[in-house]
Structure formats: structure tokens, C-alpha cells
Amino acid sequence: MFKKLVAIEPVSLIPSAEKKLHSLAEEVILYEDMPTSVNEIVKRIGDADAVLLSYTTTLSKAILSQCNHIKYIGMCCSLYTPESANVDINYANSRGITVTGIRDYGDEGVVEYVISELVRCLHGYGTTTNGVQRQPWSGMPREITGLNVGIIGLGKSGGMIADGLRFLGANITYFARSEKQDAKGKGYGFLPLDQLLETNEVVIACLNKNTVLLHEHEFSKLGNHKILFNTGLSPAWDAEPFKKWLAKDNVVYCDTFEALGDKSLLNLPNVNCFGVSSGRTQQAFVRLSEKVLANIDSYIKVQ
């Protein structure tokens, strides 16, 4: 049991999970607003031995070095690698602090977002996010059936998107660090990145935060009259070649501003971004809460 557990920012736990936290610590403080400075973060942590946070606040070495009582940090958000985390995990571990995170809690909503926006694009339904009336992508409404779709990053989210689009008749190829046997069994083709960009009309980047694979060379291979999705938490591209690519007959879809990277691009008619995470659904908050509590329970049991 912890002496003091502090959530330094809103962490999206469901009410029953927040109630459970009070049985895991002698004192529990759950902040409902965002800290606005490093000093405020340090003050909120105080003498807490357990800290919870989401993806919007960073716990750097400079902050952690001022907080001598922390034994456990629970990230109530996706953790893939120490390099992509908003916690300095390497420094925390050197201090004997355990850091846990979660994965695969909001993927279902992301799949629905991609399919929804792709259908609207192909059929010309509704308006863009800046109010421009959509026209069918190819001049005439089309189905997903027979559409060539390339997935960059075939992790859990990318794999689910691939499966959903294949069910609707798309031809799926992918690029990843290595070929995946389960994908091969489904008939998904493994391609070098250049070839994937050249041969697919739709490209969907499903990459970890701060992973950039699309540079000037890659955009030259992607070419013109293409549909690009980014479902990650940060841009999958270098800014300048991306802007040049947008000046042509292309369209991009991102659910969050963080994934787009530059809010000034929202004025362009071929940029579609609602500024809302498609993975933040009612069901996702339940899965998130269950996984956060499971991490805490596992940590307490081995102490």
C-alpha cells in the first residue's frame, strides 16, 4: 500500500477505478486540471511515493530529481519505448523508481475513425473540417473494395486497421521492421517503404510517438493524388516536404492536432483534423482504468 498517491493531471479513470485507488494508498489526491509549470508539477508531487499521469505532462530528469519520495510512476497512457515516453524512464529506473504504462486500450476507436473518414472521402459525404463540401475522391463514389492500402507500422493498432479494411475488400500491404508471419498468413504483402508508398493509393502511418519515417525522399515516392492518414501521437513526417506534398492533389487525415503538428495547416481544404483523439471512447476509458489498476496491483504485490 502506498502512503500517498497523486494524479498530477486528469488521467481519465472511470469512477469505480478512482474509488479503488483509495484502497491502495493512505492518502489519494486526484487533480482535475493541468499543471502549468515545472514548479507546480514538483509541488503537486510533494512527498508522494506514487504518481499517476497521462500523456500531456512530462516528467523529466529535472523534475524527478527534485522528488525524493517517488517509488512508483503509473503512466495512464500508451508506453511503447522509453525514448517515446513522456517520463524519463531511464533516469527513473536509475533511481529505483518503477515506471509502468499501458497499451492497446483505444485501438478500436482508431479503426472506426479511419474507416469512417475513408468512406466519407471516397464517397464525397459531408464537409471537410474547415467547411468545404466534399466531392468523391475519384469524381464518382467508390467503395473500399479493391482499394490498395499500405500500412506503415503493423503493430496492434496498424494490424487492426488492416484487418478492418481487408474485411471491406481492400488490398493490404505493409512496411514494418520485419515481416510478420501472422500477416503473411492473412495475405498481407510485406514491402520496402519506397515500394509501399509508390504502389498504394492510401497510406496509413501507425507509428510510435516521435517516430518520423516520411522525409523528402519518401514524399517523392508517395507522389500525387494520394490519401495519407496519420494515427500516431506525433507527425510521421518532416514538416517542409509534407507541406510541399500538400500543395498538390493530395489529402491528409489526422484525428488530433498533435498528429498534424502544425495548426496553421488547418486552413487548407485538403487537411482534415478534428482535434479530438478517436481512441478516447467510453469503452477505452474502461480498458484504460482496468490496465492502470492491474499495474498498480502487480507492483504492490511484489513489494
Image (spheres, rainbow, N blue to C red):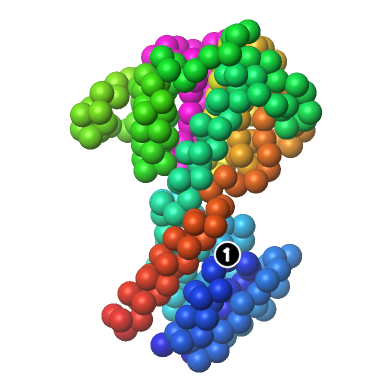
Which residue reaches farthest top? 139
Q: Nearer the viewer, residue 158 or 168?
A: 168
In this rendering, position of residue 42 left or right of residue 182: right
Q: Which residue is mark 1?
A: 12
Residue at horizontal 41 percent and vertical 51 percent from the top: 104
Res 47 → quadrant: bottom right
In this rendering, position of residue 49 left or right of residue 249: left
Residue 16, placed above or below residue 164: below
Whole-percent x, y for residue 32 in the image: 68, 71
Whole-percent x, y for residue 134 in the image: 70, 20
Q: Nearer the viewer, residue 195 or 110?
A: 110
> Which element type, helix, strand or loop, lies under badge 1?
loop
In the rendered structure, which segment of residues is drawn in magenta?
A: 195-224
Point out the image quarter for the C terminus.
Answer: bottom left
Residue at horizontal 46 percent and vertical 45 percent from the top: 108
Q: Is residue 87 visible?
A: no
Q: Is residue 160 visible?
A: yes
Give the residue type that dot 1 points to: Ser
Q: Nearer the viewer, residue 9 or 64?
A: 9
Whole-percent x, y for residue 286 in the image: 48, 63
Residue 33, placed above or below residue 213: below
Residue at horizontal 51 percent and vertical 31 percent from the top: 115
Number of labelled discs?
A: 1
Residue at horizontal 41 percent and vertical 54 percent from the top: 103
Whole-percent x, y for residue 170 in the image: 40, 21
Is 222 colored magenta in this rendering? Answer: yes
Is 179 colored magenta in this rendering? Answer: no
